[in-house]
Image (tube, coloured by chain):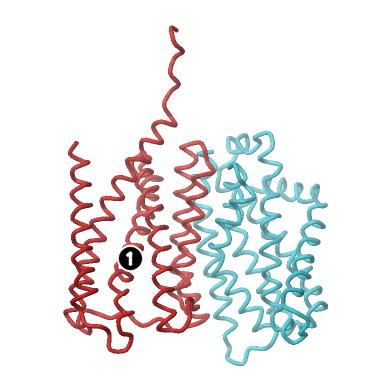
Chain colours: A cyan, B red
Amino acid sequence: MSGLLLKEFLLVWRGRARIAAALTFAAATLLMFSFSAGADGRLLQRLAPGFLWLAIVLASTLTLQASFDAETQDGALDGLVLRASPGAIFYAKALTNWVFLAALACVLLPLIAALFDASLGTLPRVLAVLVLGTAALSAPGTLYATLAGRSRAASLLLPLLYFPLIIPALVGAVKATELAFFGDPMNQWSGWVGLLGAFSMVFWALCGALSSAILEDG
Amino acid sequence: MTRERVAAGFGVLGLILLGWGSYLGLFVAPPDRYMGDVQRIMYVHVPFAWLALVVFTLAFVYAVLFLVRRSWRWDALHEASLELGVLYTFLLCVQGALWGKPTWGVYWAWDPRLTTVAVMLLSFAGILSLRHFLDDPIRRASWSATATILAAANVPIVYYSVRWWNSLHQLQSSPETVSSSMVEPLRLNAFGLLALTVALLMVRSWIAADRRAAAMAPPLPAQGA
Protein backbone atom coordinates (compact mmCIF):
# COMPACT_ATOMS: atom_id res chain seq x y z
CA MET A 1 0.00 0.00 0.00
CA SER A 2 2.78 2.48 0.92
CA GLY A 3 4.59 1.55 -2.28
CA LEU A 4 1.45 2.23 -4.26
CA LEU A 5 0.97 5.57 -2.52
CA LEU A 6 4.58 6.51 -3.24
CA LYS A 7 4.02 5.67 -6.89
CA GLU A 8 0.90 7.84 -7.00
CA PHE A 9 2.56 10.87 -5.41
CA LEU A 10 5.56 10.42 -7.71
CA LEU A 11 3.16 10.43 -10.67
CA VAL A 12 1.54 13.63 -9.44
CA TRP A 13 4.95 15.25 -8.93
CA ARG A 14 6.18 14.25 -12.38
CA GLY A 15 2.96 15.44 -13.93
CA ARG A 16 3.03 18.75 -12.04
CA ALA A 17 2.31 20.69 -15.21
CA ARG A 18 -1.15 19.22 -14.78
CA ILE A 19 -1.60 21.02 -11.47
CA ALA A 20 -1.10 24.36 -13.22
CA ALA A 21 -3.47 23.29 -16.02
CA ALA A 22 -6.21 22.26 -13.56
CA LEU A 23 -5.86 25.55 -11.69
CA THR A 24 -6.04 27.58 -14.89
CA PHE A 25 -9.11 25.61 -15.93
CA ALA A 26 -10.85 26.21 -12.58
CA ALA A 27 -10.00 29.92 -12.70
CA ALA A 28 -11.38 30.18 -16.25
CA THR A 29 -14.67 28.55 -15.17
CA LEU A 30 -14.90 31.02 -12.26
CA LEU A 31 -14.59 33.90 -14.70
CA MET A 32 -17.28 32.42 -16.94
CA PHE A 33 -19.66 31.89 -14.01
CA SER A 34 -19.27 35.54 -13.00
CA PHE A 35 -20.00 36.77 -16.51
CA SER A 36 -23.08 34.54 -16.69
CA ALA A 37 -24.42 35.98 -13.42
CA GLY A 38 -23.94 39.65 -14.36
CA ALA A 39 -22.16 42.55 -12.69
CA ASP A 40 -24.23 42.73 -9.50
CA GLY A 41 -21.58 42.55 -6.78
CA ARG A 42 -23.94 41.47 -4.01
CA LEU A 43 -25.41 38.69 -6.14
CA LEU A 44 -21.94 37.44 -7.05
CA GLN A 45 -20.95 37.44 -3.42
CA ARG A 46 -23.99 35.34 -2.55
CA LEU A 47 -23.27 32.89 -5.38
CA ALA A 48 -19.58 32.50 -4.52
CA PRO A 49 -19.90 29.21 -2.55
CA GLY A 50 -21.79 27.56 -5.41
CA PHE A 51 -19.30 28.84 -7.98
CA LEU A 52 -16.39 27.58 -5.90
CA TRP A 53 -17.82 24.05 -5.77
CA LEU A 54 -18.82 24.01 -9.45
CA ALA A 55 -15.27 25.03 -10.35
CA ILE A 56 -13.89 22.22 -8.16
CA VAL A 57 -16.28 19.62 -9.63
CA LEU A 58 -15.59 20.63 -13.24
CA ALA A 59 -11.82 20.73 -12.70
CA SER A 60 -12.01 17.35 -10.96
CA THR A 61 -13.36 15.67 -14.08
CA LEU A 62 -10.08 16.62 -15.79
CA THR A 63 -7.76 15.66 -12.95
CA LEU A 64 -9.54 12.39 -12.20
CA GLN A 65 -9.33 11.38 -15.83
CA ALA A 66 -5.70 12.43 -16.07
CA SER A 67 -4.75 10.47 -12.95
CA PHE A 68 -5.19 7.27 -14.97
CA ASP A 69 -3.15 8.34 -18.00
CA ALA A 70 0.02 6.57 -16.86
CA GLU A 71 -1.84 3.34 -16.14
CA THR A 72 -4.04 3.10 -19.20
CA GLN A 73 -1.20 3.70 -21.63
CA ASP A 74 0.54 0.41 -22.45
CA GLY A 75 -1.95 -1.50 -20.30
CA ALA A 76 0.13 -0.91 -17.15
CA LEU A 77 -2.99 -1.31 -15.02
CA ASP A 78 -3.26 -4.98 -15.98
CA GLY A 79 0.27 -5.55 -14.73
CA LEU A 80 -0.50 -3.71 -11.51
CA VAL A 81 -3.54 -5.88 -10.85
CA LEU A 82 -1.28 -8.95 -10.91
CA ARG A 83 0.94 -7.48 -8.18
CA ALA A 84 -1.43 -5.72 -5.77
CA SER A 85 -4.98 -6.16 -4.52
CA PRO A 86 -7.63 -4.13 -6.34
CA GLY A 87 -8.68 -2.48 -3.07
CA ALA A 88 -5.13 -1.24 -2.41
CA ILE A 89 -4.78 0.09 -5.97
CA PHE A 90 -8.11 1.88 -5.68
CA TYR A 91 -7.50 3.42 -2.25
CA ALA A 92 -4.00 4.63 -3.20
CA LYS A 93 -5.43 6.34 -6.27
CA ALA A 94 -8.46 7.78 -4.46
CA LEU A 95 -6.33 9.08 -1.58
CA THR A 96 -3.96 10.83 -3.99
CA ASN A 97 -6.87 12.35 -5.91
CA TRP A 98 -8.31 13.56 -2.62
CA VAL A 99 -5.08 15.27 -1.55
CA PHE A 100 -4.76 16.79 -5.02
CA LEU A 101 -8.36 18.08 -5.09
CA ALA A 102 -8.21 19.42 -1.54
CA ALA A 103 -5.03 21.32 -2.44
CA LEU A 104 -6.69 22.67 -5.59
CA ALA A 105 -9.70 23.81 -3.52
CA CYS A 106 -7.46 25.57 -0.99
CA VAL A 107 -5.66 27.44 -3.78
CA LEU A 108 -8.99 28.51 -5.30
CA LEU A 109 -10.16 29.95 -1.98
CA PRO A 110 -8.17 33.23 -2.05
CA LEU A 111 -9.17 33.63 -5.70
CA ILE A 112 -12.85 33.35 -4.69
CA ALA A 113 -12.31 35.85 -1.91
CA ALA A 114 -10.70 38.31 -4.31
CA LEU A 115 -13.03 37.85 -7.30
CA PHE A 116 -16.33 37.88 -5.42
CA ASP A 117 -15.39 39.97 -2.40
CA ALA A 118 -16.51 37.06 -0.23
CA SER A 119 -15.41 37.30 3.38
CA LEU A 120 -14.11 33.85 4.15
CA GLY A 121 -15.96 33.81 7.47
CA THR A 122 -14.68 31.24 9.94
CA LEU A 123 -11.65 29.88 8.12
CA PRO A 124 -11.27 26.56 10.02
CA ARG A 125 -14.87 25.72 9.11
CA VAL A 126 -14.31 26.61 5.45
CA LEU A 127 -11.17 24.47 5.34
CA ALA A 128 -12.98 21.55 7.01
CA VAL A 129 -15.71 21.71 4.35
CA LEU A 130 -13.13 21.83 1.55
CA VAL A 131 -11.34 18.77 2.90
CA LEU A 132 -14.54 16.77 3.52
CA GLY A 133 -16.22 17.85 0.29
CA THR A 134 -13.26 16.85 -1.85
CA ALA A 135 -13.17 13.50 0.00
CA ALA A 136 -16.81 12.98 -1.01
CA LEU A 137 -15.93 13.70 -4.65
CA SER A 138 -12.78 11.65 -4.92
CA ALA A 139 -13.98 8.11 -4.06
CA PRO A 140 -16.80 7.82 -6.65
CA GLY A 141 -14.80 10.01 -9.03
CA THR A 142 -11.79 7.69 -8.91
CA LEU A 143 -13.89 4.56 -9.39
CA TYR A 144 -15.72 6.03 -12.39
CA ALA A 145 -12.46 7.34 -13.86
CA THR A 146 -11.05 3.78 -13.65
CA LEU A 147 -13.92 2.49 -15.70
CA ALA A 148 -14.46 5.39 -18.06
CA GLY A 149 -10.73 5.48 -18.86
CA ARG A 150 -10.91 2.04 -20.42
CA SER A 151 -14.10 2.48 -22.41
CA ARG A 152 -14.51 3.91 -25.89
CA ALA A 153 -15.73 7.35 -24.81
CA ALA A 154 -13.83 8.20 -21.60
CA SER A 155 -14.24 11.98 -21.56
CA LEU A 156 -17.94 11.62 -22.31
CA LEU A 157 -18.71 8.87 -19.81
CA LEU A 158 -16.98 10.17 -16.68
CA PRO A 159 -19.19 13.28 -16.22
CA LEU A 160 -22.27 11.32 -17.30
CA LEU A 161 -21.84 8.85 -14.44
CA TYR A 162 -20.09 11.10 -11.93
CA PHE A 163 -22.30 14.24 -11.96
CA PRO A 164 -25.64 12.65 -10.96
CA LEU A 165 -23.95 10.59 -8.26
CA ILE A 166 -22.28 13.49 -6.44
CA ILE A 167 -25.39 15.72 -6.32
CA PRO A 168 -25.93 15.11 -2.57
CA ALA A 169 -22.26 15.92 -1.92
CA LEU A 170 -22.57 19.12 -3.97
CA VAL A 171 -25.73 20.18 -2.06
CA GLY A 172 -24.02 19.53 1.28
CA ALA A 173 -20.73 21.18 0.35
CA VAL A 174 -22.34 24.35 -1.07
CA LYS A 175 -24.67 24.72 1.93
CA ALA A 176 -21.90 24.16 4.46
CA THR A 177 -19.59 26.61 2.65
CA GLU A 178 -22.39 29.21 2.56
CA LEU A 179 -22.94 28.87 6.30
CA ALA A 180 -19.19 29.10 6.98
CA PHE A 181 -18.85 32.20 4.74
CA PHE A 182 -21.87 34.22 5.81
CA GLY A 183 -22.56 33.03 9.35
CA ASP A 184 -24.72 30.30 10.77
CA PRO A 185 -27.50 31.76 12.97
CA MET A 186 -29.55 28.54 13.02
CA ASN A 187 -26.63 26.21 13.79
CA GLN A 188 -27.08 24.12 10.67
CA TRP A 189 -23.43 23.87 9.66
CA SER A 190 -22.69 20.66 11.51
CA GLY A 191 -25.75 18.99 9.94
CA TRP A 192 -24.52 19.64 6.42
CA VAL A 193 -21.01 18.58 7.36
CA GLY A 194 -22.58 15.41 8.76
CA LEU A 195 -24.22 14.78 5.39
CA LEU A 196 -20.82 15.18 3.69
CA GLY A 197 -19.23 12.83 6.18
CA ALA A 198 -21.95 10.20 5.77
CA PHE A 199 -21.78 10.43 1.97
CA SER A 200 -18.01 10.05 2.06
CA MET A 201 -18.13 7.07 4.38
CA VAL A 202 -20.76 5.25 2.31
CA PHE A 203 -18.93 5.77 -0.98
CA TRP A 204 -15.37 5.23 0.28
CA ALA A 205 -16.50 1.86 1.64
CA LEU A 206 -18.72 0.88 -1.28
CA CYS A 207 -16.29 1.94 -4.02
CA GLY A 208 -13.45 0.10 -2.33
CA ALA A 209 -15.55 -3.04 -2.08
CA LEU A 210 -16.63 -2.81 -5.72
CA SER A 211 -13.19 -1.94 -7.11
CA SER A 212 -12.36 -5.62 -7.60
CA ALA A 213 -15.27 -6.00 -10.02
CA ILE A 214 -13.86 -3.13 -12.06
CA LEU A 215 -10.17 -4.03 -11.93
CA GLU A 216 -10.35 -7.80 -12.19
CA ASP A 217 -12.94 -7.99 -14.95
CA GLY A 218 -10.91 -5.56 -17.07
CA MET B 1 -42.59 -21.84 -27.42
CA THR B 2 -43.98 -21.80 -23.88
CA ARG B 3 -41.98 -18.77 -22.65
CA GLU B 4 -43.25 -16.73 -25.60
CA ARG B 5 -46.81 -17.72 -24.65
CA VAL B 6 -46.27 -16.68 -21.03
CA ALA B 7 -44.89 -13.28 -22.09
CA ALA B 8 -47.73 -12.78 -24.58
CA GLY B 9 -50.25 -13.74 -21.86
CA PHE B 10 -48.82 -11.15 -19.44
CA GLY B 11 -48.74 -8.55 -22.21
CA VAL B 12 -52.36 -9.08 -23.24
CA LEU B 13 -53.52 -9.19 -19.61
CA GLY B 14 -51.64 -5.95 -18.95
CA LEU B 15 -53.18 -4.17 -21.93
CA ILE B 16 -56.71 -5.33 -21.01
CA LEU B 17 -56.32 -4.16 -17.39
CA LEU B 18 -54.81 -0.84 -18.51
CA GLY B 19 -57.64 -0.32 -21.00
CA TRP B 20 -60.30 -1.12 -18.42
CA GLY B 21 -58.68 0.94 -15.65
CA SER B 22 -58.17 3.92 -17.96
CA TYR B 23 -61.81 3.72 -19.13
CA LEU B 24 -62.98 3.82 -15.49
CA GLY B 25 -60.51 6.59 -14.69
CA LEU B 26 -61.47 8.76 -17.65
CA PHE B 27 -65.24 8.26 -17.84
CA VAL B 28 -66.60 6.70 -14.63
CA ALA B 29 -64.59 8.14 -11.71
CA PRO B 30 -65.74 11.59 -10.52
CA PRO B 31 -63.53 14.64 -11.24
CA ASP B 32 -61.41 15.89 -8.34
CA ARG B 33 -63.07 18.53 -6.19
CA TYR B 34 -60.20 21.01 -6.50
CA MET B 35 -58.25 19.99 -9.56
CA GLY B 36 -61.14 18.91 -11.82
CA ASP B 37 -60.46 16.65 -14.79
CA VAL B 38 -56.70 17.32 -14.75
CA GLN B 39 -56.43 15.06 -11.73
CA ARG B 40 -57.30 12.06 -13.93
CA ILE B 41 -53.66 11.94 -14.99
CA MET B 42 -53.11 10.44 -11.53
CA TYR B 43 -54.43 7.11 -12.85
CA VAL B 44 -51.34 6.72 -14.99
CA HIS B 45 -48.90 8.87 -13.01
CA VAL B 46 -49.04 6.90 -9.77
CA PRO B 47 -48.77 3.43 -11.38
CA PHE B 48 -45.75 4.64 -13.38
CA ALA B 49 -44.13 5.97 -10.22
CA TRP B 50 -44.67 2.64 -8.43
CA LEU B 51 -43.45 0.54 -11.33
CA ALA B 52 -40.42 2.75 -11.96
CA LEU B 53 -39.34 2.13 -8.38
CA VAL B 54 -40.04 -1.61 -8.70
CA VAL B 55 -38.02 -1.85 -11.92
CA PHE B 56 -35.03 0.05 -10.52
CA THR B 57 -35.12 -2.09 -7.39
CA LEU B 58 -35.04 -5.13 -9.69
CA ALA B 59 -32.10 -3.63 -11.58
CA PHE B 60 -30.23 -3.30 -8.28
CA VAL B 61 -31.08 -6.90 -7.30
CA TYR B 62 -30.01 -8.25 -10.73
CA ALA B 63 -26.75 -6.25 -10.55
CA VAL B 64 -25.92 -7.79 -7.17
CA LEU B 65 -26.94 -11.25 -8.39
CA PHE B 66 -24.69 -10.90 -11.44
CA LEU B 67 -21.67 -9.93 -9.37
CA VAL B 68 -22.29 -12.73 -6.86
CA ARG B 69 -23.56 -15.54 -9.09
CA ARG B 70 -21.77 -14.69 -12.33
CA SER B 71 -24.51 -15.84 -14.66
CA TRP B 72 -25.38 -14.17 -17.97
CA ARG B 73 -29.05 -14.56 -17.10
CA TRP B 74 -28.81 -11.79 -14.50
CA ASP B 75 -26.94 -9.52 -16.89
CA ALA B 76 -29.71 -9.82 -19.50
CA LEU B 77 -32.37 -9.05 -16.88
CA HIS B 78 -30.22 -6.20 -15.54
CA GLU B 79 -30.06 -4.62 -19.02
CA ALA B 80 -33.84 -5.07 -19.51
CA SER B 81 -34.76 -3.49 -16.17
CA LEU B 82 -32.32 -0.58 -16.64
CA GLU B 83 -33.85 0.30 -20.00
CA LEU B 84 -37.44 -0.05 -18.80
CA GLY B 85 -36.68 1.98 -15.66
CA VAL B 86 -35.20 4.84 -17.69
CA LEU B 87 -38.27 4.81 -19.99
CA TYR B 88 -40.68 4.83 -17.02
CA THR B 89 -38.92 7.64 -15.14
CA PHE B 90 -38.80 9.71 -18.33
CA LEU B 91 -42.57 9.21 -18.85
CA LEU B 92 -43.10 9.94 -15.16
CA CYS B 93 -41.35 13.31 -15.49
CA VAL B 94 -43.40 14.21 -18.60
CA GLN B 95 -46.70 13.25 -16.91
CA GLY B 96 -45.70 15.13 -13.76
CA ALA B 97 -44.85 18.27 -15.74
CA LEU B 98 -48.23 18.09 -17.56
CA TRP B 99 -50.01 17.78 -14.23
CA GLY B 100 -47.84 20.37 -12.47
CA LYS B 101 -48.43 23.26 -14.88
CA PRO B 102 -52.24 23.59 -14.37
CA THR B 103 -52.23 22.71 -10.64
CA TRP B 104 -48.96 24.17 -9.23
CA GLY B 105 -48.50 26.79 -11.99
CA VAL B 106 -45.06 25.41 -12.92
CA TYR B 107 -43.79 22.46 -14.93
CA TRP B 108 -41.05 21.72 -12.47
CA ALA B 109 -40.51 22.29 -8.74
CA TRP B 110 -37.45 21.54 -6.62
CA ASP B 111 -39.33 19.08 -4.50
CA PRO B 112 -37.45 16.10 -3.01
CA ARG B 113 -39.43 13.46 -4.89
CA LEU B 114 -39.22 15.22 -8.26
CA THR B 115 -35.54 15.89 -7.85
CA THR B 116 -34.84 12.33 -6.78
CA VAL B 117 -36.65 10.97 -9.84
CA ALA B 118 -34.67 13.34 -12.07
CA VAL B 119 -31.39 12.22 -10.51
CA MET B 120 -32.46 8.56 -10.92
CA LEU B 121 -33.29 9.17 -14.58
CA LEU B 122 -29.89 10.77 -15.21
CA SER B 123 -27.93 8.20 -13.22
CA PHE B 124 -29.47 5.19 -14.91
CA ALA B 125 -29.44 6.79 -18.38
CA GLY B 126 -25.71 7.29 -17.80
CA ILE B 127 -25.35 3.58 -17.04
CA LEU B 128 -27.21 2.70 -20.25
CA SER B 129 -24.74 4.75 -22.25
CA LEU B 130 -21.87 3.16 -20.32
CA ARG B 131 -23.16 -0.21 -21.52
CA HIS B 132 -23.34 1.19 -25.03
CA PHE B 133 -19.70 2.29 -24.99
CA LEU B 134 -18.22 -0.97 -23.67
CA ASP B 135 -17.69 -3.61 -26.32
CA ASP B 136 -16.44 -6.53 -24.22
CA PRO B 137 -19.50 -8.34 -22.75
CA ILE B 138 -17.72 -9.24 -19.49
CA ARG B 139 -16.59 -5.66 -18.85
CA ARG B 140 -20.03 -4.38 -19.85
CA ALA B 141 -21.85 -6.70 -17.47
CA SER B 142 -19.68 -6.29 -14.42
CA TRP B 143 -18.89 -2.58 -14.77
CA SER B 144 -22.52 -1.59 -15.34
CA ALA B 145 -23.56 -3.77 -12.38
CA THR B 146 -21.09 -1.83 -10.23
CA ALA B 147 -22.47 1.49 -11.47
CA THR B 148 -26.05 0.33 -10.78
CA ILE B 149 -25.18 -0.56 -7.19
CA LEU B 150 -23.59 2.87 -6.63
CA ALA B 151 -26.54 4.70 -8.26
CA ALA B 152 -29.06 2.72 -6.20
CA ALA B 153 -27.17 3.41 -2.96
CA ASN B 154 -27.30 7.09 -3.84
CA VAL B 155 -31.12 7.29 -4.21
CA PRO B 156 -31.99 7.56 -0.48
CA ILE B 157 -29.11 10.01 0.10
CA VAL B 158 -30.37 12.23 -2.74
CA TYR B 159 -33.93 12.10 -1.37
CA TYR B 160 -33.01 13.12 2.16
CA SER B 161 -30.49 15.76 1.14
CA VAL B 162 -32.95 17.46 -1.21
CA ARG B 163 -35.74 17.21 1.35
CA TRP B 164 -33.53 19.01 3.76
CA TRP B 165 -32.49 21.53 1.09
CA ASN B 166 -36.03 22.45 0.03
CA SER B 167 -39.32 21.11 0.77
CA LEU B 168 -44.83 21.32 -2.56
CA HIS B 169 -45.48 17.76 -3.59
CA GLN B 170 -48.74 16.51 -2.12
CA LEU B 171 -48.43 13.74 0.43
CA GLN B 172 -49.36 10.23 -0.57
CA SER B 173 -53.01 9.30 -0.16
CA SER B 174 -53.98 5.93 1.23
CA PRO B 175 -56.98 3.95 -0.08
CA GLU B 176 -58.87 4.88 3.12
CA THR B 177 -58.75 8.59 2.28
CA VAL B 178 -59.80 8.19 -1.34
CA SER B 179 -63.23 7.41 -2.77
CA SER B 180 -63.54 3.81 -3.99
CA SER B 181 -64.53 5.00 -7.46
CA MET B 182 -61.03 6.50 -7.63
CA VAL B 183 -59.20 3.55 -6.07
CA GLU B 184 -60.56 0.99 -8.53
CA PRO B 185 -59.17 2.50 -11.76
CA LEU B 186 -55.86 3.18 -9.98
CA ARG B 187 -55.58 -0.41 -8.82
CA LEU B 188 -56.51 -1.79 -12.26
CA ASN B 189 -53.93 0.41 -13.96
CA ALA B 190 -51.25 -0.50 -11.45
CA PHE B 191 -51.78 -4.24 -11.93
CA GLY B 192 -52.09 -3.74 -15.70
CA LEU B 193 -48.78 -1.91 -15.85
CA LEU B 194 -47.22 -4.55 -13.63
CA ALA B 195 -48.29 -7.33 -16.01
CA LEU B 196 -47.10 -5.35 -19.02
CA THR B 197 -43.79 -4.72 -17.26
CA VAL B 198 -43.29 -8.45 -16.67
CA ALA B 199 -43.90 -9.11 -20.38
CA LEU B 200 -41.55 -6.31 -21.49
CA LEU B 201 -38.81 -7.40 -19.08
CA MET B 202 -39.01 -10.96 -20.39
CA VAL B 203 -38.87 -9.99 -24.05
CA ARG B 204 -36.14 -7.35 -23.56
CA SER B 205 -33.95 -9.76 -21.60
CA TRP B 206 -34.23 -12.35 -24.42
CA ILE B 207 -33.09 -9.71 -26.88
CA ALA B 208 -30.17 -8.81 -24.59
CA ALA B 209 -29.20 -12.48 -24.22
CA ASP B 210 -29.36 -13.04 -28.00
CA ARG B 211 -27.19 -10.01 -28.71
CA ARG B 212 -24.63 -11.07 -26.12
CA ALA B 213 -24.54 -14.61 -27.51
CA ALA B 214 -24.07 -13.25 -31.02
CA ALA B 215 -21.23 -10.98 -29.85
CA MET B 216 -19.44 -13.90 -28.15
CA ALA B 217 -20.07 -16.55 -30.83
CA PRO B 218 -16.90 -17.93 -32.42
CA PRO B 219 -16.35 -16.79 -36.02
CA LEU B 220 -17.56 -19.21 -38.66
CA PRO B 221 -14.82 -21.18 -40.43
CA ALA B 222 -14.06 -19.97 -43.94
CA GLN B 223 -15.90 -21.65 -46.81
CA GLY B 224 -14.30 -24.93 -47.83
CA ALA B 225 -11.84 -24.93 -44.94
Q: Position of residue A144 (x, y in %)?
A: 57, 52
The location of residue A111, given as percent across then percent down, is 81, 73
Observer-nearest of A110 and A200: A110
Q: Quadrant of residue A108?
A: bottom right
Q: Is residue B84 left or right of residue B147?
A: left
Residue B9 is left or right of residue A80, and the answer is left
Q: Which of A5 and B172 lies nearest the eye of the viewer?
A: B172
Q: Residue placed at 78% from the left, 85% from the top?
A: A41
Indicate whether B15 appears above or below A121.
above
Q: Residues within 10 Å of mark 1 (few under 14, many from 20)?
A: many
- Residue drawn at the location 76% of the way across and 82% of the way down: A118
Quadrant position of the C terminus of chain B in the picture: top left
- Quadrant (top left, top right, bottom left, bottom right) of the N terminus of chain B: top left
* Residue closest to the eye, B80 or A6: B80
Q: Residue at x 49, y 80 (%)?
A: B164
Task: Tell me which corner region of the image, top left, top right, bottom left or bottom right, holds residue A136.
Answer: bottom right
Instruction: Indicate the quadrant where residue A200 lies.
Output: bottom right
Q: Measured from the top left, where is residue A112 in percent x and y?
A: 78, 75
**Which residue lies under the disc numbered 1?**
B48
Count of numbered marks: 1
Question: Residue A64: percent from the left, percent from the top?
Answer: 67, 54
Label 1: chain letter: B
- Residue sticking out furthest to the front: B27
Closest to the observer: A105 or A127? Answer: A105
